Amino acid sequence: QVQLVESGGGLVQAGGSLRLSCAASGSVFRIGVMGWYRQAPGNQRDVVALFHSGGSIEYADSVKGRFTISRDNAKNTVYLEMNSLKPEDTAVYYCYANVYSFTWRAYWGQGTQVTVSS
């Protein structure tokens, strides 16, 4: 079984910073796509930042220049450094990973709340 465990959400004032972490644990043989989505109340879940299998990085236009995704392959961990936060960044942030553990399967973290006050 594979689990994605997130940490690092919280409440911050506009202009502030937060760092999210997500670690994949369990029978992780290989990780393909890994990264972050977010979902605000009443909205669909959207991509924030992703590492794709070939190593390329995808960012949502709304976070380019402010958010940075990074990873530690040895720890099966991905990070999201969020700077210059805006109230519209308020959402539940979900870690996502496509993991090979006897078969390929998509996994989601439990979600971590990020609230940016104006």
Image (cartoon, rainbow, N blue to C red):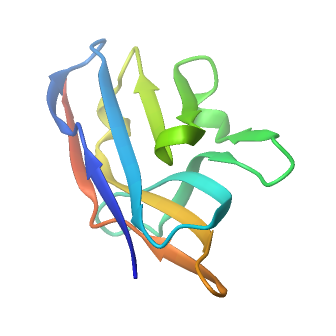
- Quarter of the picture holding the C terminus: top left
Quick check: 87 above or below 98?
A: above
The percent position of residue 108, horizontal first and vertical second, equals 42, 70
- Quarter of the picture holding the N terminus: bottom left
Q: Nearer the viewer, residue 74 or 86?
A: 74
Q: Residue at x 76, y 51 (%)?
A: 52
Residue at the extreme right of the image, as rendered: 54
> Is 27 on the left or on the right of 14, as rendered?
right
Residue at the extreme bottom of the image, as rendered: 103
Q: Nearer the viewer, residue 10 or 54?
A: 54
Q: Residue at x 59, y 40 (%)?
A: 73
The percent position of residue 91, horizontal first and vertical second, equals 30, 50
Q: Residue at x 40, y 14 (%)?
A: 84
Q: Residue at x 54, y 34 (%)?
A: 72
The percent position of residue 35, horizontal first and vertical second, equals 56, 50
Q: Nearer the viewer, residue 43 or 73?
A: 73
The percent position of residue 68, horizontal first and vertical second, equals 55, 25
* Numbered circles on residues, count: 0
> Is 66 on the left or on the right of 29, as rendered?
left
Residue at the extreme left of the image, as rendered: 11
> Is 98 on the left or on the right of 81, as rendered?
right
Q: Nearer the viewer, residue 76 or 64?
A: 76
Quick check: 82 above or below 96?
A: above
Quick check: 32 above or below 108?
A: above
